[in-house]
Amino acid sequence: CTCARARQLEQKMAKRAIGSADAVEDEWWVDGWKGEKRAAVAQDDVSTSKKRKKAPKSLEPPLHVEEEDVLYTSAIQRQKFARAMHDTLKGILTPVERDAMKIKRSHFIECSVQCAQPSLSQLLEQAIPKWEELVKALHTRGSPLVIVLSVSANRAVELRRQLVGHCKPHRVAKLFSRHMKADAQSSFLASHTTPVAVATPSRLLDLLDNDALNVDNLCAIVLDWHWKDKKLRSFSCLPEVWQSFVELYQRHFHRKVKAKQTRLLLY
């Protein structure tokens, strides 16, 4: 009996030892699996980071765009003006006639000013250095030295205010609608010496067609080129204004511009 009990105790002890060994083995296997998984993930991260290459730095210097000076007639604005004229005349004139109307650099006044935003009066002082002498020598009535063309009557009023002190003791002619009728403007031109006239293209065209205005002494045509309305439309973007100007230029101004008696200034 004693021997049988001893054997039973040995068997129980052996089973417990095996169970504890299995438990330890299971724990080791789980820990080992987790460690291998961590190592694999770390290896994947390393390989992924190796594959990711940094974008090469650009060796080209940054593009530097200079701001265009909109205060005087620049090369870019001359090209825009010439292109607009060409596109408009393309459906009106023959190639030979368009070639005769070609816009050249010599047709423009090029000047610079010290002020960041000069008034029209300040710009004209730079564009026409002998202004005072020309005004003193002007005696012909209704024959301005400078014509300023604007897109509307309201804008023309603003420009005229800038020129009030530029041609004293003479008055600046108002050649646009709403403020004076065409008959009243014709009477004014017939009785006054006006070195400067502010006009809209359509009204100026009517006055020239009726011989109310003389352009024999005209030395500069100033276009309110850079100004934009609330809808961001400029001089060449308003069809009625631009079409009137093109007709005005073709019929009354181009001959003098081509002969370099009159030049253009984009304000």
Image: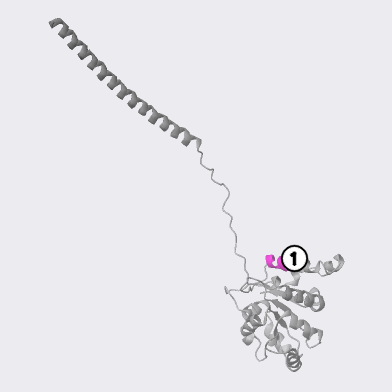
Q: Quadrant of residue 236?
A: bottom right
In the figure, 43 relative to 153: above or below? above
Whether the magenta-drawn stretch holds residue 79 is answered as yes
Q: Quadrant of the N terminus?
A: top left
Residue for point 77% across, 81% down: 205
Query: In the figure, is residue 119 to the left or right of 196?
Result: left
Whether the magenta-drawn stretch holds residue 201 is answered as no
Q: Position of residue 239 (x, y in %)?
A: 73, 72
Q: Quadrant of the C terminus?
A: bottom right
Q: Which residue is mark 1?
A: 83
Q: Nearer the viewer, residue 192 or 50?
A: 50
Q: How is the image coloured?
A: one colour
Q: Nearer the viewer, residue 51 or 192?
A: 51
Residue for point 80% across, 79% down: 252
Q: Quadrant of residue 14?
A: top left
In the figure, 125 relative to 15: above or below? below
Residue for point 71% across, 66% down: 80
Question: Neighbour class for label 1 at 10 Å: few (<14), some, many (≥20)?
Answer: some
Q: Quadrant of residue 234?
A: bottom right
Q: Position of residue 141 (x, y in %)?
A: 76, 91
Q: Is residue 120 in sight in this rendering?
A: yes
Query: In the figure, is residue 169 to the left or right of 50?
Result: right
Provide the major secondary structure of the magenta segment.
Answer: helix
Q: Is residue 260 in sight in this rendering?
A: no
Q: Amino acid at mark 1?
A: Arg
Residue range corresponding to the magenta coloring: 75-83
Q: Nearer the viewer, residue 152 or 198?
A: 152
